[in-house]
Image: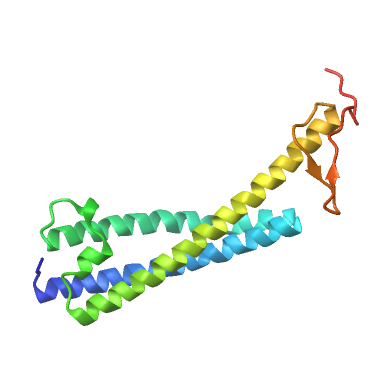
């Protein structure tokens, strides 16, 4: 897979610029997710609402990054004479570059992959915290209306609380 020097220079520049913007986006996303985690752990609903409201721009940026990635791959497919851009990756584009640029691009891509893994782990941790909170709320609501709960709950000191058999609040339907 060889392309003219002018084309490879352009591909290198486009890929590097894309990776830099993607890294900036993922860094912002990680910061938001870490703040969300703090809010969940501390039970700070007001701050959580503010973080969610303030991070609305990230959704727009994500859509822009997706369009930019699509355009980059389409241009690379034409430049490299690849019939379908869906199979193109940074690694495959880097193969058309000289060794120094290929190495630089691959190092940048590897750093971005690590950052994306951190974002995924943080997001998965937040999802776990949310599931835990939702389950606790579900059990509290079941207890309040007198519905039996399955399993056990842990009290503030870590001891097992027995399921409640009677309603704490009477509901009239």
Residue 147 lies left or right of residue 69; in this view the side is: right
Picture coordinates of residue 93 (x, y %)? 21, 66
Colour setting: rainbow
Q: In which quarter of the image is residue 79?
A: bottom left
Residue 33 lies left or right of residue 59; in this view the side is: right
Q: Which residue is painted at 87% across and 28% down in the image?
A: 165
Q: Quadrant of residue 102?
A: bottom left
In this rendering, the answer to whether 161 lies above or below 34 is above
In this rendering, the answer to whether 147 lies above or below 154 is above
Q: Which residue is painted at 74% across and 36% down in the image?
A: 138
Residue 100 lies left or right of residue 24; in this view the side is: left
Image quadrant where one finds the C terminus: top right
Q: Which residue is painted at 75% across and 32% down in the image?
A: 150
Extreme-top residue of the structure: 173
Q: How many marks?
A: 0
Q: Which residue is painted at 60% across and 50% down in the image?
A: 127
Q: Which of 13 and 104 is in front in this view?
A: 104
Picture coordinates of residue 33 (x, y %)? 58, 60
Q: Nearer the viewer, residue 36 or 155?
A: 155
In this rendering, the answer to whether 95 lies above or below 36 is below
Extreme-bottom residue of the structure: 100
Picture coordinates of residue 26 (x, y %)? 47, 64
Q: Which of 10 and 41 is in front in this view?
A: 41
Q: In which quarter of the image is residue 81?
A: bottom left
Image quadrant where one finds the N terminus: bottom left
Picture coordinates of residue 163 (x, y %)? 83, 34
């Amino acid at each position: 897979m060889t392309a003219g020097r002018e084309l490879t220079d352009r591909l290198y520049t486009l890929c590097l610029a894309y990776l830099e913007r993607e890294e900036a986006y993922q860094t912002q996303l990680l910061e938001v997710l870490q703040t969300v985690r703090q809010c969940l752990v501390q039970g700070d609903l007001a701050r959580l609402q503010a973080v969610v409201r303030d991070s609305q721009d990230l959704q727009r940026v994500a859509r822009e990054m997706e369009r930019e990635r699509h355009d980059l791959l389409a241009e690379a497919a034409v430049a490299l004479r690849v019939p379908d851009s869906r199979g193109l990756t940074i690694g495959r584009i880097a193969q058309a570059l000289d060794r120094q640029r290929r190495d630089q691009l691959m190092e940048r891509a590897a750093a971005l992959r690590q950052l994306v893994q951190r974002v995924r782990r943080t997001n998965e941790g937040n999802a776990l915290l949310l599931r835990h909170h939702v389950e606790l709320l579900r059990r509290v609501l079941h207890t309040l209306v007198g519905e039996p709960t399955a399993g056990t709950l842990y009290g503030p000191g870590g001891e097992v609380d027995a399921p409640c058999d009677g309603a704490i609040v009477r509901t009239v339907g």
